[in-house]
Image: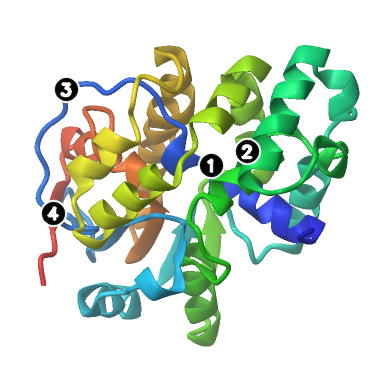
Amino acid sequence: MKTIFRFAVLLFIFIFPSAISAQTKSPKLENSLLWEVSGKGLKKPSYLYGTIHMICSKDYFLSEKTKKAFDVSDKLYLEINFTDPNEMSQMQQLAMGKEPLSKKLSPEQLAKLDSILKKSTGMGVQQVDSFSLLTVLSLISMKSFGCADLKFYEMEFSEEAKKRNVSIYGLETVKSQFEILENAYSNDEILKLLEESTSEESEQLVTAYKNENIDSMYALTTDEKFTSEKTKKQILDNRNVNWVKAMPELMKQNSVFFAVGAGHLGGELGVINLLRKEGYTVKPIMN
């Protein structure tokens, strides 16, 4: 069994790539994970980078263009600041369920969860009884990558930022993100996500990521078979809107490197399109 800390980290940053909802029309984007944000009075350009959050070590890469952009940035903004001890403490607490799964779920739901766990992880429901259902979803999502040596983009960026004494911040708090997830899914929807999580989908996502294909990643992460349009709005659209409201002030005086899940970049209400609507020039950095 992994440690509670590892479970907690998985809970908050690794669900999003494979658990979003219905695809909408969106402007076609060039194949690049890295985008430069300029114009509208900014003194320096800032950068927007789409992460896959976790990836097997053999597939991990960080392009030279990304390293250069990161090196000239003054601040690092992640979805959550994982270097903040208070956030880490909150994360560990929230990874535990408010009540045991054996009390939270009906006998039918519990039996389904037990079957899914045994098939995907070799564990039984008794071994995860004290965790939240979202934590269990995170564990199975991790297993779908099919390797033990995972690398975490947010952790890599944080380590590099600490080496350069670059300040690290979060666009959200652990508590707010957890509340969004709790409100977005019913127990049955989470169980459906657990059933639908496959290694093939993870492989497709990794391939699209390595090709820097934002449109393909958006298509894969907005598959209507998973959840409702309501869930998409809560997990992607509303959060994107909130981030873009905050970003102008953050970029005004400093060059900021924003690293968020790549699923947040594409789409009509993706961060790229929303920033463009606000009057910023957002262009891909190709090499």
The answer to which of marks 4 and 2 sits earlier in the sequence is 4
Disc 3 to disc 4, C-alpha distance: 17 Å
Residue 128 horizontal/vertical position (percent):
82, 41
The answer to which of marks 1 and 2 sits earlier in the sequence is 1
Query: Is the residue marked by circle 1 packed among few (<14), some (14-19), or many (20+) residues within 10 Å?
Result: many
Numbered disc in front, either 2 or 3: 2
Disc 4 to disc 2, C-alpha distance: 30 Å
Task: Work out whether 23 lies above or below 51.
Answer: above
Query: Is the residue marked by circle 3 packed among few (<14), some (14-19), or many (20+) residues within 10 Å?
Result: few
The answer to the question of whether label 3 and label 1 lie on touching residues, with beta carbons closer than 8 A, is: no
The kind of residue on which mark 1 rests is Ile
The answer to which of marks 3 and 1 sits earlier in the sequence is 1
Q: Pointer 4: what residue?
A: 31
Q: From the image, which quarter does the N terminus lie in?
A: bottom right
The answer to the question of whether label 1 and label 2 lie on touching residues, with beta carbons closer than 8 A, is: yes
Disc 3 to disc 1, C-alpha distance: 23 Å
Query: Is the residue marked by circle 4 packed among few (<14), some (14-19), or many (20+) residues within 10 Å?
Result: some
The kind of residue on which mark 2 rests is Leu
**Image disc number at residue 74:** none
Residue 103 horizontal/vertical position (percent):
90, 20
Task: Work out whether 148 lies above or below 17.
Answer: below
**Image disc number at residue 137:** 2
The answer to the question of whether label 4 and label 1 lie on touching residues, with beta carbons closer than 8 A, is: no
Q: Is residue 259 visible?
A: yes
The answer to which of marks 4 and 1 sits earlier in the sequence is 1
Instruction: Indicate left or right for 234 with 73 as reference.
Output: right
Residue 240 horizontal/vertical position (percent):
38, 35
Q: Secondary structure at mark 3?
A: loop
Q: Pointer 3: what residue?
A: 25
Q: Pointer 1: what residue?
A: 15
Q: Nearer the viewer, residue 58 or 49?
A: 58
Q: Nearer the viewer, residue 193 or 82?
A: 193
